[in-house]
Image (cartoon, grey):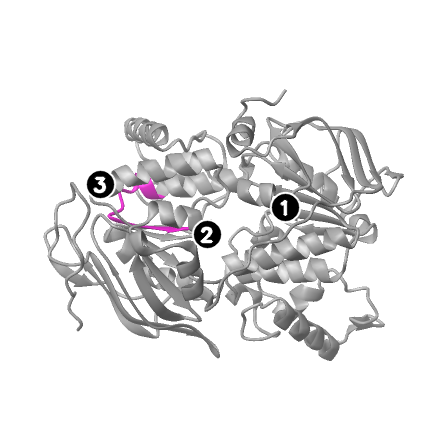
Amino acid sequence: MTSLAPGPPVGPGTPAMPGPILAMRGMTKRFGPLLAADSIDLDLNQGEVLALLGENGAGKTTLMNMLFGEYTPDAGEVRIRDPSGNEEVLPPGQPQAAIAARIGMVHQHFTLAENLTVLDNILLGTEPPFSSRRSRRRARARLHRLMEASGLNASLDVRIRELSVGERQRIEILKALYREARILVLDEPTAVLTPQEADSLFGAVRELVREGLSVIFISHKLREVLAFSDRIMVLRHGRRMGEMPTSEADVGKIVRMMVGEEHAGVDRSPGEPSAPALVLEKVSVPSSRAQRALFEVSLTIHEAEILGIAGVAGNGQSTLAQIISGLLQPGEGSISIGGKNVRRLTPARALREGIGRIPEDRYQDGIVADMSVAENIVIERLDSPEIQRRGILRRAAIATHAEFLIDAHDIRCPGPHARTALLSGGNIQKLILARVLEAQPGIILANQPTRGLDVRAAGEVSRRLIAARDRGAGVLLISEDLDEVLALSDRILVMQGGRIAETKSRDRAVIGAMMTGGSVG
């Protein structure tokens, strides 16, 4: 067995260990013909934040899933050093062994039971099913202290199914912190947090790092990587490309290592808005378990315009997206498309009216995981004569169409007949974007369109949305990534507490304050 090689010293105030706390050696994983991880080595030191970077499909999440026991490697081993300095080899494919070794993982795709409360989800696996009221009171008190320290507030008695995507991500982070992990894996932890919330989270985790916590941090937000990590390791096409101390890194160096070339920024000229494409007038929705309330929301999306909506998750953006998608009927107010009043907007009518939908939750609302890549690409076009004839699917035409879009949108997958469940989160997002944008809709609802995408893929999505605007489409961009809203939007609205207000400001601090309730009336 491979012994642990000595690693660099840990940070100030952290008791030194004789070597890395974690060593992964020769980690290899195949999914059919796709080599997702190719003999990857990784070391992690106590009291260190290691940023693990790479394009979508580079193997980052696959590698971490092997660490956490969710995937069984085809080759390789994981060695852990305990607080006494003893080494052990983790048995492969056993998440309970990883948890027992105090490895915590905050997944990019959530692992929460929707029918249970927030408190029950956090305690799941740490307390007996029928724990005493006293132990639950202690758990509540400890969680309140964690929430106060991290700024990640949550109502402990709400069921998970009632929470937005952003709120669920906060619960995943709290769950990992509650379990006192010695090694914490954060897979895109700030994808749905405001800048203020992200800063608060990083501050809380940094305090834990000073006390000896070791962190592996996966992110496509290079500004966060440079601010938060100590060391950077880059994967490309399932291989380890190299590493560097963060103090010696800059965006150019990181991108060159990730993709082999410089990354060109998005060139956005101002739009030239014309006629209204979609108008909502005083739309209201009562609050319920299924959605947040909206209060007399009025907005107009013009042709050839990108209208950005910024806001903290859970303030009504999901409800607004459901209305525009035809999944929810407003209690009051009116909707018009292309100047025509629409009495009842359904998902089928939304498609007929030329509304392309990029959903917030790619797994639940964007794909059927057990269907093939090709089937998911054409799932909204099943009535097209190119796709079916007399009710019989034209399989060869579907596969040819899928191969074209896989190549055009750089969807990393074994092929058009592969199960979509095998794709990484970023490549599933590329699939959805390919399906929507290829149809050239007149109105595009882009809900978190670059969440989980690497820097090159996110730039390509941004360019495609701008190109759609320039050909005349009206784009509604809903994003919790304030940088994305500022970079792409011709106009900016802020949602807070189910209400909406326009802002002329392009200042991050001003908009961030509005997102948290500072200035929206």
* Placement of 188 over or under 174, stated as above or below: below
Residue type at mark 3: give it: Arg
From the image, which quarter does the C terminus lie in? top right
Query: Quick one: SS at disc 3?
Result: helix
Residue drawn 47% across the image and 63% down it? 55
Indicate the position of residue 324 as horizontal and vertical percent values: 73, 42
Q: CA distance from mark 1 to mark 2?
A: 24 Å
Density class for disc 1 (Cα within 10 Å; few <14, some 14-19, many ≥20) is: many
Magenta stretch, residue numbers? 176-187
Indicate the position of residue 37 as horizontal and vertical percent values: 39, 71
Q: Nearer the viewer, mark 3 or mark 1?
A: 1
Question: For mark 1, what is the residue?
Answer: 488
> Which label belongs to residue 108?
2
Query: Quick one: SS at disc 1?
Result: helix
Is 509 left, or right, of 498 in this rendering?
left
Q: Please identify the quarter of the rendering in which residue 495 is found.
A: top right
Q: Nearer the viewer, mark 1 or mark 2?
A: 1
Quick check: is 514 in the magenta stretch? no
